[in-house]
Image (tube, helix red, strand yellow):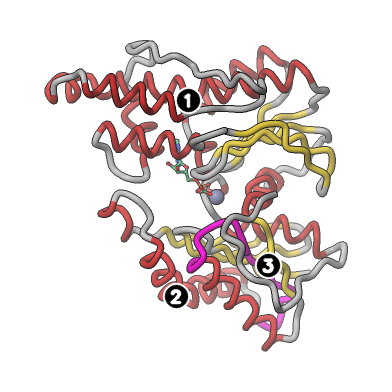
Amino acid sequence: MNILGIETSCDETSASIISDGNLIVNTVYSQKIHKQYGGVVPELASQEHLNEIIDVIETTLEKSNLSIVDIDALAVTYGPGLMGSLLIGLNFAKGMALSLKIPFLGINHLEGHLFSNYIDNKKIHFPHLSCLVSGGHTQLWLIKDYNDYKLLGQSIDDAAGEAFDKGARILGLNYPGGPEIDKISKNGNPNFVKFTRPKVKDSIYNFSFSGLKTALLYYCNDLSKEDLKLNIKDIAASYQEAIIDCLNQGIMNVVNNYDIKQIYISGGVASNSRFRQKSKVLQAETNISIIFPKLEYCTDNAAMITMAAYHKIIKGEKSSFDLSPIPNLKL
Ligand code: KG4
Ligand code: ZN
């Protein structure tokens, strides 16, 4: 069975093909237009999807050596995300499904991130912990089976990726801030500023990052421009360290209270090099393997959407043509 998946929830136009559960090709076009505005501009994002989607899908088909008539089903993100962006992908998938007379299935983008961990890895053990850390979400999921998840905790304010992006803006770095902070922190001292690691009263599985961002803002406001420039690597490394420590503390809290066989990390922040480095220490402490997806499956991509769809389509799931985009879709 060949499934063509489409992802257009934010600023990546992406298509992929999974054949009998194996990824054949994944094409991602990352929109560059937003950089100059310091964040994603929704109207420009949908326009860019419209400009690029045909090319992305044609490239995907060409690379797969399959023809369009070999596609048995379509998968597409229908939320959460930007309304205009979701509409482009969803309507494109509906149009293709209608003309090819094949089924299509709407996929929750968050579920896609969880499935990014199963693209290359076939040794999956349940129950496992899935830590989803993206630009919009920071969540800890107990995964009992492919279709059986329980949300243990999440950020009560900013997501970890948002904390990276907002922190980068305070430091005067480019958007998206995560990769920028990651890059300059490599030569920085993570203990230069002792940022408090915020704790959430209600639950040991919840996170809070907005106070950390405010602490960075106050710290930078007290510095002269010259001092900020001089110490930017150390300040960025210290801020990054605080975010990673909070994530690792949440993971530890789950490990201490649940019988977990594996730990999976997903979402854009899973690309972070310090997070990956520190997870090795955590792995040694907990004796539980911590698995990150390949870098190209951390940030938004259609491969993860198609993988999530594969596990549902083989069970006969499909969507009806009245499916609408849901920008604030929950999992
Ligand atoms: O999963 P994703 O592509 O989109 C959402 O679904 O939100 O995640 C994007 C987020 C952005 O906030 C970006 O700054 C962050 O992931 N990110 C990183 C890194 N690469 C991307 N954060 C920290 N370190 C990175 N290397
Ligand atoms: Zn995402």
Mark closest to the chain's N terminus, 3 or 1: 3
**Disc number for residue 243:** 1
1 or 2: tag closer to the N-terminus: 2
Q: Position of residue 188 (x, y in %)?
A: 32, 19
Amino acid type, mark 3: Ala
Between 12 and 290, the one lying in front of the other is 12
Position in image of residue 228 (x %, y %): 19, 23
* Horizontal relation, residue 251 to residue 278: left or right: right
Residue 212: name its quadrant.
top left
Callout 1 amino acid: Ile
Q: Which type of secondary structure does the marked residue at label 1 adopt?
A: helix
Dot 3 corresponds to which residue? 75
From which residue to which does the magenta span run?
67-85
Residue pictured at 67% horizontal, 88% vertical = 99
Q: Is mark 3 within 8 Å of ligand 2?
A: no
The yes-or-no answer for disc 1 within 8 Å of ligand 1 is no
Q: Cβ–Cβ below 8 Å for labels 3 and 1?
A: no
